[in-house]
Image (cartoon, rainbow, N blue to C red):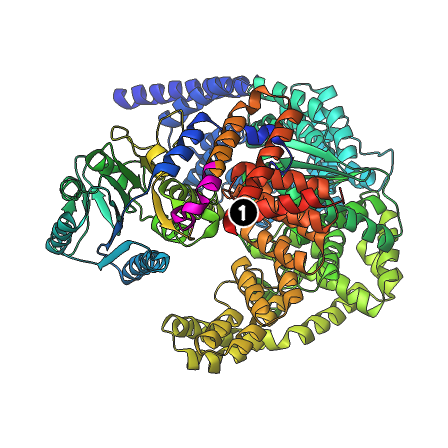
Amino acid sequence: MGCGVSWPLCLLRVSAFQIALLLFTALAAPASTYYLTITGLGGEPDFTQRFKMWADDIDTSLKRAGGDANVVTMHVPSREQVRTRFAELARQVKANDTFVLVLIGHGTYDGVDYKFNLQGPDITAGELAALMDRVPAQRQLVVNTTECSGGSIEHLRRPSRIVVSATRSGTERNATVFARYWAEALREPSADTDKNEAISALEAFRYAQQKTTDYFETQKRLATEHSVLEDTGKGTGERNPNNDNGEGKLAASFAVVRLGANAAAARDPAKRPLLDRREQLEQAIEKLKFEKAAMPEADYKRQLTQLLLELAKVQEAIDK
Amino acid sequence: MRLVVALGLVLMGANALCAQTLQQAEARWKARDYQGANEIFRQLVAADPKNPDLKVRWGRLYLDHQQPNDAQDLFAEALEIKKDHAGALLGLALIASEGYEGRAADLARKALESDPKLVEAQELLAYLALEDNDNAKASEEAHKALALDANSITGKAVLATIDWLADKKESQWDPHAAKGYEVAGHFFVINRRYEEGIQYLRKAIELDPQLYSARSQLGVNLMRLGQNEEAYKQLEICFNNGFQDAATRNSLKLMDSYKNFVTFTTPRTILKLHKKEAALLRPYIESEMEKAIATYEDKYRMKLTRPVQVEVYPDHEDFAVRTMGLPGLGALGVTFGYSIAMDSPSGRPPGQFHWASTLWHEMSHVFTLTATNHHVPRWFTEGMAVHEETSVSPEWGDRLTPDVIAAIKNKKLLPVTELDRGFVHPVSPGQVVVSYYQAGKICDYINEKWGWNTLLAMLHDFAGAMETADVIRKELKTEPPDFDKQFIAYVEAQTQTVVTSYDDWKKGMRTLVDKVAAKEWDSVIADAPRLRDQYPDYVEDHNAYEALAQAYLAKGNKPAALAELERYEKTGGRNPDTLKSLAKQLEEAGRPKDAAAALDRINYIYPMDAAAHRSLGALWLVQNNPKGAIREFQAVLAKNPLDQAQAHYDLARAYQANHQNAQANDECLASLEAAPGFRPAQKLLLELSNSPEK
């Protein structure tokens, strides 16, 4: 029955961490988002076709979302072409913008350095990190979906950068499927689990991770990739980012793609009091959820109902 | 000369040492000091590597220690030294018989040709004949064994077992020996008469408490009947005393894992499911169990006296432990009286397993076994079970496979009186599948020509311990060979097209697959219909239906693609992705009821797909089937989806439609608890709060 009416089970999912995430989300309002998706060498027609298809899928979702997005997709570029694009980004992007890099293709790891396979010479994780460092955006996301991508975390991680990798280490060497599901997450409403009409990096990561796990389970195959996320600048990547391991805070507040026009209301000064009340209610709900474990179930349900009903009425008024 | 004499003395000494040491090895073996005996055999063989007798005895030690692979190597080495070594041939025959291999009897016969006085080989022939339920032959071979050795325990045991299986309480051949009762126990078990088998195994260990092979079998069979406490105790005794064959080891391991299972009971059913999938599978399996019991009680005109238990294993290896040591395929499900064990739909790749078909098959065994007090021959109970699968729905059950086509073409179907042999001692792995098909078709044929009442009458005859030949004569008024001729004509008429065109079809399909890969759609559309009609039952990977549908879609002919997929579905196509695609196309074509039916079919094949449950729930909700929608949305939640808010909201809507507003309210709160800003749930909450209906 899942947690249909089983309140105690749901209770466990609420934490102070989520309250912090909500506040963080509410405060984050980036100017523009710059996206760069790069496909590497496929090696075989099947891979080449697959990489292109996934990258195009991402490209379509981002462009459909519109807004302030600046979307560029490069298919099998050379290292020089990548450098040139980063040089352009270094000039265009501002500090309060955000930047998203997605790598789709094959990767290698020799025990020391990770390389992303490009046309001509490959590019190392170290060089990619240096190129990203020159992009002024303070908030950055890099999604490395290749095999061995776990080997790139050490080079790419920074305190204000989210690093997602398809594998937990450089030694998972089988071709991956993570990119397929990352692309799916950006167009799939069910990935938006908090229903705020935006898919955060954490939501997309969890969606893609779950789908990848399901893929291997369904096929009755041994899982050869285990995606991780790092956003503290000092970790090695976590399978399950949460309050306990301190990973995921930045990713939760980083909107990769916006599905609706939820920002429009925020610009209407007449609705400011309602918006303030909504924020108060949301905070009160999160606080109540945090206190759930220590409350009698009936009290919790009564208070939650009261708050949610009021929130629903406030939202109705905002939407008018 | 002196040197020669000296050498002779040394050799004589060595022989004496060998003889003495061989006795020691045998003594240690008899005392169950396997390690000690093994060490002595190792030294003996090192000293005399060209002695096949030593290798054979060493091999028998390994066989006794449940290491058949090592034993087989030693027997093979002995045969390299002496190609007709009777003991080595017998050793290989014994190994083959353990695995119910058809070649066991040939090997035993070769051993007898090499040594006509080899009693064990003669005993094995009697044993194998009785495994085939060929009582006349088994009796003849057993008497031959007794002629060679009047004290042959196996010879007596086979003769006594023939009497006991025929419900004679006393037998002049009662061996009064532990090994003899172990033999009897084995035959009762393979005839699915587990409780009586257990009684004989108990007698065996009463006489010889150290006969761990019998004690282990006692434990395994107690487990089969759900008497786990005693089963565990017996198996643990075996394990602690060094008897650690695969059945003992794996059964103990399986019982240790039972803590991960949960049990659900109703007055008529007991369902054991793994915790991780219990919430999802319970509604589907429980309702099919209830339906099957009600249907069969009506059809078989009998009432079950206790609940039927079904155990569902998500790990196929766990399920395999339940069938270990039993003849036949047992690949998907197995029935022990009122207890069924089967694979979970999650245990196999999507589309490879129709769990509901398997469940109805096994439930049918519960009735045929109970109706005959477990006297039904294997071919008839399997035949009825296969017949029942397609009675539920024509697209259920197994399709005609290449193995069956080859058997029909090459006239390899067995006479009805020998059909048990195809299950118990198949000459090839494919023969078991063929035997299932043949048994099922025989029941279909009898049902069509003589009617259901005749099948029931046959069942009652078997309950009276009548043999197949007599039952055929009595109920079908024909001699078995004549029945075989009529039946073959019936099958050949039904399969004529596919049998005659199979080679052409195979060639054509290879080309078709290439054409699909090359996207030569016009050519696919031209060729595929003929190939489809040549072998309509072929719905596995790379089938003509899907190729054709794909080609039509590529050419923009949606109605033709849809028609082809519907044909695939009706013929028994089981690929969940294809069925989902069919449902989508049906919905687009404005046929939501058919779309829902297509998705519901997936529930009987692979109910692990949350997206399919959600789609079906949504369809049923708009088709005013809120109860169905509730079940489907509950299934989504049971999969613990990432999108909890949507899943709870969907269920809330279904409850609301079913006028269960209190439940709807709870689900709505759960949805908003996960995502307080989820507007559809907010609206529903307001609606529910304003509704007078609670």
The N terminus of chain B, quarter of image: top left
In the image, residue B435 lies in the stretch drawn in magenta: no
Q: Is residue A121 left or right of residue B635?
A: left
Res A148 quadrant in image? top left
Q: Position of residue B538 (x, y in %)?
A: 56, 67
Say left or right for B212 vs B72.
Answer: right
Residue B234 against residue B217 in the figure, above or below: above
Residue B399 position (above or below residue B370): below
Q: To which chain does the residue with label 1 belong?
A: A
User: Which corner quadrant of the image does residue A9 belong to?
Assistant: top right
From the viewer's perspective, is A97 left or right of B80? left
Q: Residue at x 76, y 54 (%)?
A: B380
Q: Which residue is mark 1?
A: A317
**At which x and y percent is residue A103?**
25, 49
Q: Where residue B223 sits: x, y (%)?
A: 68, 30
Q: Nearer the viewer, residue A126 or A320?
A: A320
Identify the element where label 1 is drawn: helix
Q: Position of residue B270 (x, y in %)?
A: 74, 37
Q: Nearer the viewer, residue A319 or A57?
A: A319
Q: Residue at the location (44% across, 46% down)? A: A270
**Residue span colored magenta:** A262-276
Position of the C terminus of chain B by quadrant: top right
Residue B650 appears in the picture as rendered: yes
Is residue A294 or residue B401 the one in the foreground? A294
In the rendered structure, which amino acid carries the disc numbered 1?
A: Ala
